[in-house]
Amino acid sequence: MSWKKRSATIISTIIAKLIIRKYRPLVITITGNVGKSSTKEAVALVVAQKYTIRKNELNYNTEIGVALTIMGVEQSGSPSTLVWLNHLWSGIKLLLKRQKNYPQALILEYGADRPGDIKKLCNIARPDIAIVTNIGNIPVHIEYFEDIEKVYEEKSTIIKMLKPTGYAILNYDNEKIYNFRKLTQANIISYGFDGDSDVNVSNYKIETKDDLADSSMYMRFEYKNYFAPFEIKQILGKGFAYAFMCAVSTGLAIGMNLIDCLHALENYELLPGRLNLINGVKNSYIFDDCYNASPLAVENSLNLMGNFTNNRKVFIFGDMLELGNYSEKAHRLVAKHIIDSHIKIFIGIGQKTKFTFESLEKSGFDKNNMYHFDNADEARLKVQDLIYPGDLILIKGSHSMHLEIILKEIAFEPDSIV
């Protein structure tokens, strides 16, 4: 990190801490290895029914991103010294003169690339409500941790630093995360598909239609003795069901009722590159899941593909990065989910997906339906040739694999791709 960025980070975090102390907003924090951004958007919809809110945009979940969110300024890639000074001045003005319209609630995504990151973020804004989403058997960002247990230890920090009067919202379906409840005196709300969780979902199903764009997700929410059905079109997959459970749990923690929470979630909109179902060339359909990839997220996306039985299925898979010594194992394990989801065509992009390719070969996957390319640009024209009318295509890989190059080649309206 350059001296300029380091200095700006230190000063920004100091200002952000003082802003939190002055305005005392409700601080809602979200961490986990998968589903943070989707959860943040769902929580924001619900909490906005009761409070004025601010959330960090995109995945600005680092020290500087969180600090600038608290200050109310947008983060840019490599701002000039003048831009940094303007950012800092915006924060200082909040301290010099109280602003009546400062948000009543902040919804902050907390990321952890390295040990100690969560503690740094909690020291900026200590949570009143802390949400833990999920952690896979091979977590993303594990490259900088000794082992999986160290990842859990890092994520548990958000619960250890939770205010005693607050709420810990924990994934009951992940036993290790649910065990975080032992680390705090705060109130606990558990959520999951398991019927013993406080907020749980049953009767989950994907309703597919001839026109896939009309497909919907249905589930039944339960909390204590209250039940409510919920259906939403085009928002598909268990990852979103979990995000909605987190949002409902947060709404209950701030005194809302189940029905009002679900009404708010009816307005949920997908973030770019997160399982957006769009039209492709040759009357095909595409799940645009290009934004990023981790083993659990890939598994979830492939499981969703398994719900569609009337379409030939194509999987375009880019390398999953930041997995350290677990990389080969993670990419080989994807092969099983590809087979279970009845994928017909596999297209691997990057060096690490060669492991997936090899494992598919050993499993008896049709060699005539397997392709591999070193990068997205090399693959884009061939992919278009491989598509048939009615195909359902899943595109997923780490952000730096630039799979949007392929997406724009096969999307019916490429100019609409963000």
Image (cartoon, rainbow, N blue to C red):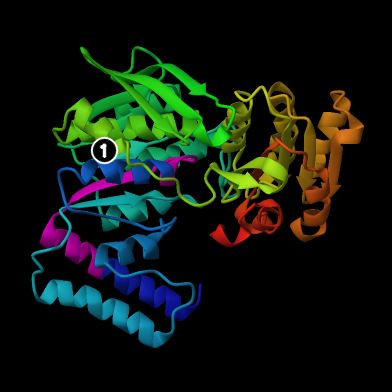
Residue 79 pos. (x, y %): 44, 79
Dot 1 amino acid type: Ala
Q: Nearest the camera: 282 or 75?
A: 282
Residue 173 is at least partly visible in this image = yes
Q: Residue at x 22, y 15 (%)?
A: 224
Numbered disc 1: secondary structure: helix
- Residue marked by disc 1: 264
Q: Is residue 173 magenta?
A: no
Say whether residue 207 is left or right of residue 55: right
* Number of marks in picture: 1
Residue 347 pos. (x, y %): 79, 42
Q: Is residue 24 magenta?
A: yes
Depicted 31 relative to depicted 245: above or below: below
Q: Nearest the camera: 267 or 204?
A: 267
Q: Residue furthest right?
A: 368
Residue 387 pos. (x, y %): 77, 42
Say whether residue 250 is left or right of residue 314: left
Say whether residue 381 is left or right of residue 337: right
Q: Residue at x 41, y 56 (%)?
A: 61
Residue 128 is at least partly visible in this image = no
Q: Residues within 10 Å of mark 1 (few under 14, many from 20)?
A: some
Identify the magenta region. Answer: 15-37
Q: Nearest the camera: 233 or 351?
A: 233
Residue 117 pos. (x, y %): 42, 53
Q: Residue at x 58, y 29 (%)?
A: 304
Depicted 242 relative to depicted 33: above or below: above
Depicted 295 relative to depicted 173: above or below: below
Q: Residue furthest bottom?
A: 82
Place residue 264 in its image quadrant: top left
Q: Nearest the camera: 202 or 400?
A: 202
